[in-house]
Amino acid sequence: MQTGVPLNETCNLQVWKLEISDKSKGFVELLQQLTVCDAISDEDFQKRFQELSSLGDDHVICVIEDTSRGKIVTTGSVFIEKKFIRNCRKVSHIEDVVVGCDSRGMQLGKKVLSFLTDHAQFVGCYKVILDCSNENKAFYEKCGYKRKEIQMVKYFI
């Protein structure tokens, strides 16, 4: 296991990049608190994990584990889009930020967002984009994000 960064004095909250073993610590169940996410077999999880891991710094999933419970309590991801505009610069997209119901109010969402934002800046992105619901708008504004234009979507299923 990689060493995480302690987030509190008792060191029971640690932040790091997703590891294959995090599936058994409730990672998928945490995503189910955010949106539709069916059960994922170990084989499918491993395939997707390997696929995303092969992208290196272009796709990072961050997790916070409560090590006293062996449970993933917060997650979020960032992926990097390479552009032709702005002298071939990069843009990052933050997705799938969720704090477990039993871990809210501990500033963990801000910590994950900071980890992902710092990563985007470190790899040379000129901006970070994220979409959120109206209910979460105030949270993201407190984290330094501002509303810009609108989001459009077209679902295929």
Image (cartoon, rainbow, N blue to C red):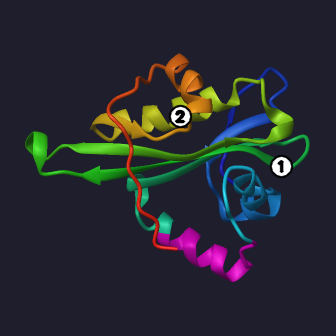
In magenta, the rendered stretch is 39-51
Main secondary structure along the magenta-highlighted residues: helix
In what quadrant of the picture does the N terminus appear? bottom right
Q: Closer to the N terminus: mark 1 or mark 2? A: 1
Q: Report the residue at 68% width, 65% height from top.
A: 37
Residue for point 85% across, 25% down: 10
Quadrant of res 130: top left
- Residue type marked 2: Phe
| Residue, disc 1 | 71
Mark 1 residue crowding within 10 angstroms, few (<14) / some (14–19) / many (20+): some
User: Which residue is denoted by mark 2 in the rendering?
Assistant: 115
Left-right relation of 10 to 147: right
Is 34 left, or right, of 73 in this rendering?
Answer: left
Which disc is residue 60 wearing? Answer: none
Whether residue 155 is visible: yes
Judge the density around disc 2: few (<14), some (14-19), many (≥20) Cα neighbours within 10 Å.
Answer: some
**C-alpha separation, residue under disc 1 versus residue under disc 2:** 19 Å
Residue type of the residue flagged with mark 1:
Lys
Give the total number of marks visible in the rendering.
Answer: 2
Q: Is residue 46 magenta?
A: yes
What is the x, y in percent for residue 115? 53, 34
User: Can you say whether 20 is above or below 86 in the image?
Assistant: below
Left or right, residue 31 beside residue 110: right
Specify whether residue 139 is painted magenta: no
